[in-house]
Image (cartoon, rainbow, N blue to C red):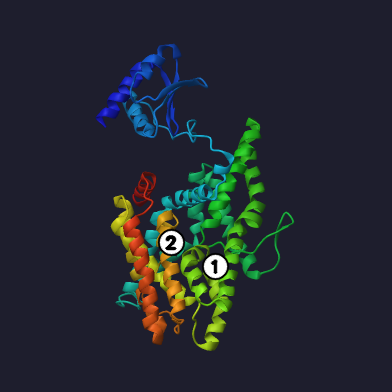
Amino acid sequence: MANDRKLASKIIDTVGGKENISNVTHCMTRLRFVLKDEGLASDDALNAIPEVISVVRAGGQVQLVIGPTVDKVYDAVCKEGGFEAQTAIDENLDAPKLPFKERFAPKRIGNLILDAVSGSIAPILPIFCIAGIFRMFTILLGPEGAGLLSEESSMYQLFTLVGDAAYYFLPVFGAYAAAKKFKTSPVLALMIAVIMIHPSMLAIVEGGAPFDVYGIPMTLVNYTQSVLPIILIVWVQSYVEGLIKKFCPDMLRILVIPVGTMLIMLPLALCVFGPAISFVMGIIANIIIWLGANAGPLCGLVVGATWNLVIATGMHVPILTAMMPGWLEVGYDAVCTPGTTVVVYVTFAVALAYGIRAKGKANRQLGWTTFATYALGRVSEPIIYGILLRDKKALAWSMIGGAAGGLACGLLNARIFVFSGVGFPWMNVIKFSQDIVPGAIGCIIGFAVTFALCMVFGFDNREATENAAEDAMEA
């Protein structure tokens, strides 16, 4: 900190003193000074400062290329000079221009998608923790647990309401966080989200009758308890709003920007990008159903690898609904639910390893909190959204472990005989009933493989994700 202050003082003096600075901002790598008299800033003197990589004069600014530590230097400059700190400019002039093939490489696109999802979920981590803790209270203190609270008691109903509200309005929380991530209007994003889960919209979906937006058929989707569709929609909104801002006359901005953005986003959200997630996951659902009917052990592998993603999009309900009659008719299931049961223990393994192995106090706290709320409160979403969809390594290890355990269940012909709840998630192995030995082997393999991968290879805890988690947990 002392070194940053000395550097800041030296920079201020070299650009002509704080009286010569009209404004100072920063982007990802540069300090950007607007000076009253640029002649007072000596390029040679600035270049002589070891921490300054180069000096660029452009756009009426004197820009000092500092590198990735620019945010710390900027904070020190603001404190030293008494300037008001501003949000970083979303521009990195020093970022290398990638060739066309590299820009659209599958790995890079996948990383960008995970970064977008992670950045949109990190700010709402407290929501998942709140929901998990309050649901845990209702189970431990309610009729299923100690019996201290009856279902009719105000406390029980209140805690249930808190837990349910967090997930019911998940698109609203996701819209706000995604708007911050993509630097678009949070108010417009929230407006789109509440339209998607408005009671009248849900009635239209429930009714099943055709509905259109400007004559465009709308896919009937219930978006409550989902977050991925709204993240995609807000990303699109950021471009729509940006284009309108670019061409809108100044005198009409207050009206045209919000109204124009909403007019354009309604069909895009309700007819195109909102249903897109459901369409993709619907394909996965159909594949799982087909594999269940035709491919035996391979279905367990696919289910084990993808089930947490299926839950994240809400497609687990139609899959189970479609396959349940067949299971009930024969009295067991040997292809799908063994894999979903393995995923329970895989999910435990990720949260436990995250609590032990993740970098940063906030990330480890998140791991222990989500582990406890899943073990005692039967809530897996905090782990899915808070860890798996924020950390690509955690997601990868869970998919590998789930695939291994699901395949083992299929090869050992472990069948699920109990389709109702059996208590806490860690008791789910009981569902295998007379096949509990091969079923337990599959679950142990899933847990062990996942936990070992997590502990040996760790997680994708970059400094940015650590800071995001810490900021979120302190929100």
Residue 171, how many percent across, how many down?
52, 57
- The secondary element bearing badge 2 is classed as helix
The front one of 394 and 153 is 394
Above or below, comparing residue 40 to residue 365 in the picture? above
The front one of 113 and 98 is 98
Above or below, comparing residue 173 to residue 323 in the picture? above
Residue 217 lies in quadrant: bottom right
- The secondary element bearing badge 1 is classed as loop
In the image, which disc is placed on residue 385? Answer: none
User: Residue at 32% of width from left, 29% of height from top?
Assistant: 76
Above or below, comparing residue 9 to residue 114 in the picture? above
The reply to whether the C-beta atoms of the residues labelled 2 and 1 are less than 8 Å apart is no
Above or below, comparing residue 237 to residue 377 in the picture? above
Mark positioned earlier in the residue sequence (2 or 1):
1
Residue 423 lies in quadrant: bottom left
The front one of 127 and 391 is 391
Crowding around mark 1 (Cα neighbors within 10 Å: few <14, some 14 to 19, many 20+) is: some
Quarter of the rendering occupied by the N terminus: top left
Asked if one can make out residue 448 in the rendered structure from this viewpoint, the answer is: yes
Asked if one can make out residue 153 in the rendered structure from this viewpoint, the answer is: no
The front one of 473 and 13 is 13
Give the labeled residue for mark 1: 315
Residue 113, how many percent across, how many down?
51, 50
Residue 391, how many percent across, how many down?
41, 54
User: Residue at 36% of width from left, 69% of height from top?
Assistant: 447
- Total marks shown come to 2
Give the labeled residue for mark 2: 384
Residue 276 lies in quadrant: bottom right
Q: Amino acid at mark 2?
A: Ile
